[in-house]
Each structure stands twice: as C-alpha cells, then as structure tokens.
Image (tube, rainbow, N blue to C red):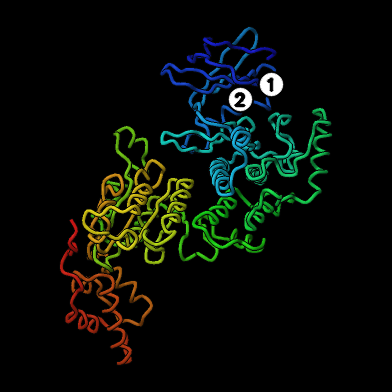
Amino acid sequence: MDKRLFKKGDKIGKYTVNEFIKKGASAESYTVYGSDDMLYFCKVFEITGMASSQLFEGKEVFEIVFCRELNEEKNDNIIRYVDNGGFRKGDKEYHYLVTEFYQGQLLNESLEKDGVFDVEDAMQITLCVLNGLIFMHSKALLHNDITPSNIMLKETEDGMLLPTIIDLGHVSSMVMGRPNFFVGDLAPFFRAPETYRGIYTPKSDVFSVGALLYYLIFGKAPWEVDLADCYGDKNLVKAKVKEARKEELVLDTEEIHVPDFLKEILKKALSLRVNSRFTSAEEFFNVLVERLVPEGTDVADEEALNESGDAKAGEGQLPEEAARIKFKKGSGNGFDQVAGRDELKEQLRKEVIFALQNPEKAKKYKLLPVNGILLYGPPGCGKSLVMECFAEELGFNYTVLKASEFGNIYQPGVIDSLQRIFDAASLMAPFVICLEELEYLIPNPGPENVTKESVAMLALMNGCAKRGILLVVTSNQPEQVDPFLLRPGCIDRVFFVSQPDMEARKDIFKKHLSERPTEEIDYEELARLSEDFVAGDITEAVNEAAMTAAYMDVPISQNILVDVLRYKNPTYATKTKIGFK
C-alpha cells in the first residue's frame, strides 16, 4: 500500500469516503458516510501477501473477526462493530471493517492539550479501560496494545466523556512465543517485559493499563527514556527499555505527589515480575473501586493492598469501611430464596426484570427502561430480602446500602459519597443500587419545600437507566420520604410488600425451628394460625414456644406452638398499607 487507496467521494462497499485518517503497517483508515448519512470509521486491510497465520482460518483478518465477536454483547468501553466486507482492486484483495465513529479526544491528545489528569480522574479513566478489558478477557481475548493513543474520551449524548478502547489491531488469543500480529508498532514503554519474549497474557494487559494510569498522572510512560538514538532498531530498543527498568520506578516528583495507596497500586500493576502483578484485570478494577467509593483511609503498605485482592471473586469491599458498602455479583436465581409471594415475584419479573434481561425485545416493543422501583410495607415484611433477591435474580452487579448506617442527604459529605457510588456503578453497569430505609436517607423537608439537597439528589437519581443503573429502594414509611423524589424518572414503579403469605410463613417457621429439638410439626397449621404475622411476629412466637419447651425440658411440640399462636396477635392489621397510595 504505497499510496492512498481512496480519495474523498470514492466508494468502499456501500460506504462513501469522507476523509483519509492514517496509514498503518497493513491497513489504511478513513472516515466514511453510510447510506443513513451517518459518519463511520473504516479500516481497509490489504490481505494479498499476508501469511495464512495472520488470517483467521487463513481467510479473514483477525481484527475483523475479533471486533465482530466482541460486539455480540454490548460493552460501552469497547468500540462498536458496524459492518465488514471485501473487494478486489487491481490484482490485490482487500477486507474492510466499519465501526462507529466517535467524536472526542484521544487520551494522548487530551493530555498534550490540557496537561496531566488529577488522581481521581486518572483512576476513573483507568476503571473504564479495565471494564473493557475484563469483558475482552472473558471472551478469552487479549488486547496487547493499551496505550493513550488507543483510548478515546468519547462524547456521549448527555455531554459526558466516556473512555473507550478504539483500536483492536493487536487483539489476539493468548500468545506464547510467536505473535500472529505485527509487533513493530507497539509502544515500547507500555509493553510488559514478557512481551519482548513473545509472551502475551492477561497479566501483560494489566501491566499496560498500569502504564496508562502512570502516564495519566505523570504525563509520560513509566521508566520512559529517549529512544531516538536507537533508529528504530528493535534489538536496541529492547535493550534500552530493559536497562531503563533496572532503575527504581519514580512515584513522586516536585510537582506531582501520589497518595501512598496509589503508589502501592502502581507498584503492583507495574511489577516486572509477572507473579507479583494483579492476577487479573478484575482484581485491578476492584482495588481501584475500593479506593474511589466512597473515600476511605489510605492503604499504607503493600501487605494491605494484597489483602484487599483476596476478596471472593465477584465481590469488592472497602478496607475499614466494609460495613458501609460491598459490591456483589448476582447469581441469576435469587427468587428461589423467597418462599411464597408468587404474585409479587411475577409482578417484578414482568414489569422490571423481563425488559432488563431481554434488551432486544425491549427495543423491539419500545419498552422504556425502568429507572427506579420502590418496595414499601410494614417493618418485618421481608422488603430487604425481596430487594436483595431481586438483584440476585437479575444477575447484575449490585450493592446494598442501609441509610441509617450511611447517613442522610442533609449531613456533610453524604451526597458526595453517593455521587462516587453512582459513578462507580455506571462503570460496573449493568448495576443495581439497593437503598434501604429511604425515609431516613431522603426525609420529607415539609410541604412544598424543595431543598438544594433534594435537587442534588434528583440529579443523581434522574436518568440512572441511561447509565445502566437500576435504583431499588425500600421504605417502611414512604409518606416520610421527600415527595420531590418520588416521581417518574426517579421512581417509576411502586410495589407493596405485604405480610408474608402462607408459603412464606411456612418457610419462616421451618427456618426458625430447623436447629431446635422438635416433635413432628404441622407447618400448614402453623401458617394458617399466623395469618397477618410479619417475620418478627413469627420469630417471637417460636422463641416463646422454645422457652416454654426448655422450661419443661421437652422438645418443641405442635401443641406448644399452637397455644402461643392462639393468644398472640399480629403487629399489623390485614394488608396494612401504612397510609401510602
């Protein structure tokens, strides 16, 4: 490809060339217009003369195959595949790949224009890149070329900037010794040491992301030195990079001071020893999330950092703030843990879960995404259980926050902490934020009294669905919640969680009696006698029966349980709706 293949107005398949972008080792890039008059990015590959090892099954360019495969499921941090095709020009054969064209700035361009990023912004960008890599690695694919020139700050419809991996030219399956892609254009100081021996693994991608994070903070790659005197000689470059990396990594300068916790993160990500690095992009991601949401105490040493990486797979937890926030991954079968309540579960499946788990059908039938749901009812009716099982049923990432431990929006710093949680949730989307005791978090300020805190909270809650977040909240007293926030766009669906039904009451009795000495128990009768009882009422009844049996030194019997239930009244009247419509 000695000269440009196309000029403005030429056709590439059904696409019209708009502008030449650049020429690479084996491809040229253009912006093109589709038949819909939308602007796209197009990469044209000359495959004549390519070795069969450079083509998938000897027929198709690997980048096209991998880009198509990665876009079978949506990930906002990876460039979107649109189309591909092929043609002949003269005696040569070409393939082309069409992807979305993004307005925005490359990371290296942004840094050159505006200077280095502050620590928090650098971490947020890195989280987005790691999110894309986690998805890529889940498909058994490696990126192999994470650099600032391959990440774009894409402008979204709401004016936000979303870091997106835009170049998939070096994507591969795991490589051990003989890469099937061109390595001459890889950025030397973003490459892990083992890649110079032909070994590319998820951990080498982790190193590159660590180098990216370092670059965003310091404005240059780690251990970066001048390579001008190498004149492109790959052996000289390799030797000079290796020599530079014998020096201690600079983690503080006169102008830039890095928090201790981040120094340890960078050391671990950029370890020259593979076994000392983060074990995966997901572990790297979780450690960064733990630092961002909400602000905690600094990780003082590497031992503390390593301990944070030992959390169970699928969970992230804040050091010293574990009681405040924990991230989990839903199992996909959470309602199996909820006995009875068939009507409520069916409502939730039909009105909320179905569209979220079937996005294609939702799009076809133009079903609007649910932004938030409220579960309300008397205390002890199992709202918290239903809420967490709902999140588990969806199978998304989720967190459960209790307002009484977290604080309310009128206390200093609470809205800032919530902002950080919502920001992190959008990075881990699809995500469910579960908030218990909404009346405590957002108390009613009084008739027609809209506060600045209410407005700030509205800004957080409104439009969550567009960011891949579903808000699920519970309340014992929804009339005590600021009504300014109980509106469509914030809370779209309201579900009443009544006292446990027959099956649920049987299940509660079974759980409370399972590890106590009992005679044969008729759970059907107990459930009938305990109509309108909430879980707390049943717990109290079983405890009273157990106390009587212990005093008599006999097993808990049906008669003892029935006697307790005959004189005990439920806390709430039938189907109590506590004054909320």
The mark that comes first in sequence, 1 or 2, is: 1
**Whole-percent x, y for residue 560 in the image:** 24, 84
Classify 143 as above or below 437: above
Category of crowding for the residue at label 1, using alpha-carbon neighbours closer than 10 angstroms: few (below 14), some (14–19), many (at least 20):
few
Q: Amino acid at mark 1?
A: Met
- Marking on residue 50: 1
Q: Position of residue 260 (x, y in %)?
A: 65, 58
- Tell me the amino acid under the disc marked 2: Val
Give coordinates of residue 161: x percent, y percent: 49, 37
Q: Which mark is residue 202?
A: none
Quadrant in the picture for residue 229: top right
**Which residue does the numbered mark 2 point to in the structure image?**
61
Task: In the rendered view, tell whether residue 24 sits above or below residue 381.
Answer: above
Total marks drawn? 2
Q: Residues within 10 Å of mark 2 (few under 14, many from 20)?
A: many
Q: Residue at x 60, y 58 (%)?
A: 309
